[in-house]
Amino acid sequence: MTTSLFMRIRDCFPADLNKTLLETTDGSRFTYRDADEWSSRYAAALHGLGARKGDRVAVQTDKSPAALFLYLGCIRAGLVYLPLNTAYQTQELSYFVEDAAPVVIVCQPQRKADMEGIVKEKSVSGVFTLDEDGQGTITQAALEQPVDFAPVPCADDDLAAILYTSGTTGKPKGAMMTQMNLWSNGRTLVDLWGFTASDTLLHALPIFHTHGLFIACHCAMISGAGMIFLPKFDREQVIAALPRATVMMGVPTFYVRLLAGDDFNADLVSNMRLFISGSAPLLPETFAAFHARTGHYLLERYGMTEMGMATSNPLTGERIIHTVGPALPDVEVRVCDDQGQVLPAGEVGVLEARGPNVFAGYWKMPEKTREEFRDDGFFITGDIALIDKKGYVHIVGRAKDLVISGGFNIYPKEIETEIDKMAGVLESAVIGVPHPDFGEAVVAIVVPDGTQTLLPDDVMNHIKSLMANFKVPKKVFFVDELPRNAMGKVQKNILRDEYGTRN
Ligand code: AMP
């Protein structure tokens, strides 16, 4: 056991460590040497704080080069990285801290007091800060640390990260990602998408999610490429950066927004070799408009937190709209019926996947883990799909009640539970309706109990005070009762038909 995810990635760094890894909007450049040295300093600082192999480090910070180096520091020290969406509010954070019991928490400076309140009674050795410029108490602790911290060896099935995903019951589940899960997927994608040291990846995704952190950053670092590292998707900044980029990864919303102005055209992207789309369904209109405007076929791929990428349209070869391509070379996919019987090509069922990319299970949820795996190791994704005769996967829906807004997953149950607790509410149903920008938007249908007058703003403000902004309903409708089927289940399809286009 002389290797680890960190060591494998570090071995792929270019021989010339002065090569640029990150370029930021203010023109600052960070080299591979910076990544190496800062990962050492952060690793040593965390070690000094008592964090040992397998301990969790929870991180809720803005995106910055320092945040990426902190991630590298965690895996260098054999720690388990636990990224948290910056939109999460106190109630949500409290659950993660309780569940994952991190030894160290690093947060935005403005959240420090809040975090300290949360950890008061828990065994956290400290709450540290990191701001969007890379400054904060964790950086102060790292500043004087050595630049040659010896990477901690890890077994392939040791954990490298825990990523929380919303649960169907409303309770988030921590997907345990092993060293090999993350390494194998990055390695495979570099070859599949043809990444080389000559590439410059335009990075506008958040780095608290598998897409922006593991898929994007690992592909760049494993190939020795550079990244234009934008704090977030800002159309103007993306337009300004595109002429210097060769690859972009994004959610469909990014591409819809780029197409919204004429300044996005073939001339602007003449240096680009590849645009990749995923995390939510790509509309055929977007695919067609993108090709008409730029001459590029968007490469759509499919994955999820629990397994990174599982399928991808090809780099060379036919990219077929409405499909997410065949399985990656080291991943197996199949479509099964409810009993787990494998269905023939063309038949619709639940997509299952197996491979070195598939996670080790849900943190502290052995039963939930068992429910979502077949005996032969296939993971039941919950996505409804068919595999055509060419082996291309078509995602046709979701078995689980899930809304994807701007690439973020939202389980309606979590929001319904909070609305139902409000005084004056009898019950509620939360649905996703088509939205031109976000793909889907959250809408709440509420049945008042008649004890008091409620306005849509009351419901929106209540959820806003509790949850991340992307979960706040964009619209609230009041009804006398919810449509239900014979089994008493709310018929969300009827609600979607009724409220999908209403203003
Ligand atoms: P996440 O765990 O946030 O990465 O979300 C995973 C879910 O996003 C999957 O289970 C799918 O429902 C959905 N998803 C990801 N990529 C695609 C895609 N290309 N087309 C349709 N749905 C997708």
Image (cartoon, helix red, strand yellow):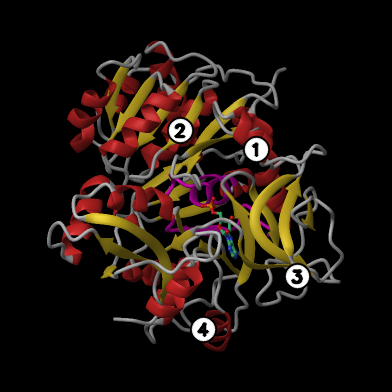
Name the disc covering residue 316, or none. 3
Are the two marked residues, 3 and 2, in contact with CB atoms closer than 8 angstroms? no
What is the number of the mark on residue 359?
1
Quadrant of the snapshot with the C terminus: bottom left
Discs 3, 4 touching: Cβ within 8 Å: no
* C-alpha span from label 3 to label 2: 35 Å
Residue 266 - label: 4
Q: Residue at x 15, y 56 (%)?
A: 451
Binning the other alpha carbons within 10 Å of mark 4 as few (below 14), some (14 to 19) or many (20 upward) gives some
Q: Which residues are magenta?
A: 193-218
What's the amino acid at mark 4?
Answer: Ala
Q: Determine if the magenta segment contains residue 209.
A: yes
Is residue 25 in view?
A: no
Disc 2 packing (10 Å; few <14; some 14–19; many ≥20): many
- Local crowd at mark 3 within 10 Å, few (<14), some, or many (≥20)? few
Q: Find ligand 1 in the image and state its quadrant.
A: bottom right
Read off the residue under disc 2.
Answer: 82
Please tell me which residue lies in front, 389 or 69.
389
